[in-house]
Image (cartoon, coloured by chain):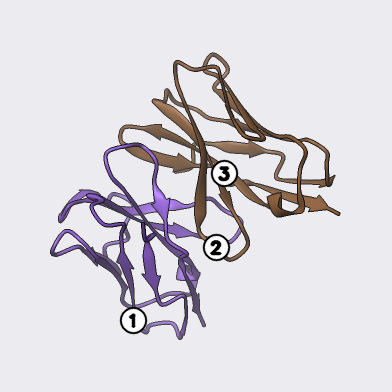
Chain colours: A brown, B purple
Amino acid sequence: SQQGEEDPQALSIQEGENATMNCSYKTSINNLQWYRQNSGRGLVHLILIRSNEREKHSGRLRVTLDTSKKSSSLLITASRAADTASYFCATYSNYQLIWGAGTKLIIKP
Amino acid sequence: EAGVAQSPRYKIIEKRQSVAFWCNPISGHATLYWYQQILGQGPKLLIQFQNNGVVDDSQLPKDRFSAERLKGVDSTLKIQPAKLEDSAVYLCASKAGQETQYFGPGTRLLVL
């Protein structure tokens, strides 16, 4: 069963703008991970945040985690055309990754 | 380091036929996963192997799906007989001891 729910389902922004995606989940977790999936390709791991962390950065990516609200957000700053993809959050619990349905991000030139 | 390899990349079959997918994980990765991803949804775990043993196959439709990893390296996922609702992308992933999973390009299956 799917645990994570991403919001919004789809997002279209201009190149150079920031993109924010949210993820909510239901049960306690060990960590939460964000993945990117380009059209027709496999999933690529972006960033992992542990349950005792509140914020993490990687390049243009910033992830926050609020375990009290069971939610996470992914911020992509200064978006580029190459960021066009679907973004999935996945929660790691009981040795298993459980995935949301994803946010489809389109960057307009 | 070579990534996770999968073949074929695309497969079209008619319902009630059988099909097999192959996965070669990253060298040294003990854990191997098969996922099913239906269009517009996130991946759904079908089966997880640790070396050549099954860790979790609770979501594998065992009446028609089977998977094996006989020597603890590459793996095969089979569907027999296929149904229309099996049309999806089948993803293979592997990991070593850390939490990050590394995915192959997937096999896109269309059942007509």
Q: Could you tell me which chain the residue with mark 2 belongs to?
A: A
Determine the CA span between mark 3 and mark 2.
Answer: 14 Å
Would you say B58 lies left or right of A34 here?
A: left
| Residue to which mark 2 is pinned | A41
Q: In this rendering, is residue A38 above or below A35? A: below
Q: Quadrant of residue A78?
A: top right
Q: Are marks 2 and 1 on the same chain?
A: no
Badge 3 or badge 2: first in the primary sequence: 2
Q: Are marks 1 and 3 on the same chain?
A: no
Secondary structure beneath dot 2 equals: loop
- In this view, the residue in front, B100 or B70, is B100
Determine the CA span between mark 1 and mark 3.
Answer: 31 Å
Secondary structure beneath dot 3 equals: strand
Q: Could you tell me which chain the residue with mark 1 belongs to?
A: B
| Residue to which mark 1 is pinned | B18
Q: In this rendering, is residue B23 above or below A77? A: below
Q: Residue at x 43, y 74 (%)?
A: B83
- In this view, the residue in front, B78 or B69, is B69
Q: Residue at x 69, y 49 (%)?
A: A83
| Residue to which mark 3 is pinned | A88
